Amino acid sequence: MSFTKESCEQFVEVLASKAPVPGGGGASALVGAIGTALGNMVGSLTVGKKKYAAVEAEIIELKAKSDRLQSELLALVEKDAEVFEPLAKAYGMPRETEAEKAEKARVMEIVLKDACEVPMQIMRKCCEAIDIAEQFAAKGSTLAISDAGCAAACLKAALMGASLNVFINTKSMTNREYADSVNKEAEQMLKTYEAKADEVFASVRARL
């Protein structure tokens, strides 16, 4: 099933069901894509307006970055579902004998890393999109400024949601050095970009 090709109604219905995917990771990627697109819309409403001619080249560049991020985040909706299947199978592996326990532990480390990398990518792209939303809010059309604030709110939610999918996977890793390094990066992104998203939202709110 290609989740991003389904209707919004179908996606939400599957998300609400007992189906293992999509879950929080895929939902976060989709919300991230939506947040990025909202910022991009501000750019679209800015380009071509005489009032913003001085920043048009910069806005066009930001829109190109947003186009790329939207596509990448949508791809991560599908990727998140792909990496969950082998993880689910690994959890179900037998561990009756010492050999089975060792094999399960080996496989788990591999699939946990894969399952962790996808939400990390979602987080990184949301951070990049928050930086862009900040620029759209500051330089884009004031008629669409509320959409820049909404973009920041969506991207913050996506960032936070993806982080939980990182932490639930690193918690199960036996390689604590690797897990700690991933957690450190994720925590730093949260610390920096939750605050930045809040600042963008607050700046927009103050101008309405």
Image: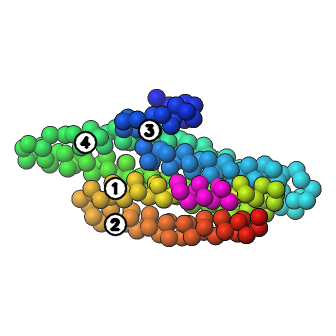
Hey, what amino acid is under mark 2?
A: Asp
Mark 2 vs 1: CB contact within 8 A: no
The amino acid at mark 1 is: Ile
Gap in angstroms between the C-alphas marked 2 and 1:
13 Å
Element assignment for label 2: helix
In front of the other: label 3 or label 4? 3
Q: Which residue is mark 3?
A: 16
Cβ atoms at labels 4 and 2 below 8 Å apart: no
Which residue matches tag 4? 90
In the picture, residue 137 is in which quadrant? Answer: bottom right
In the foreground, 195 or 114: 195
Of residues 33 and 62, the one nearer the viewer is 33
Residue 56 figure quarter: bottom right
Please give left or right for residue 125 compared with residue 176 in the image. right
Instruction: Please name the residue shown 91% across and 59% down the image.
Output: 51
> Which of the numbered marks, if any, corresponds to residue 168?
1
- Judging by the rendered image, the residue that carries numbered circle 2 is 180
Mark sitting earlier along the chain (3/2): 3
Which is the main secondary structure of the residues drawn in magenta?
A: helix
Q: Are marks 3 and 1 in contact (CB under 8 Å)?
A: no
Which label sits in the foreground, 1 or 4? 1
Residue 41 position, x and y percent, is: 74, 49
Residue type at mark 3 is Ala
Q: Which residues are magenta?
A: 149-158
Disc 1 crowd, CA 10 A, few/some/many (<14, 14-19, 20+): few
The first of marks 1 and 4 along the sequence is 4
In 3D space, how far apart are the residues under numbered discs 4 and 2 (Cα atoms)? Answer: 22 Å
Q: What x and y, as percent, mark residue 17?
A: 40, 35
Residue at the image point whose x is 52% and y is 47% from the top: 29
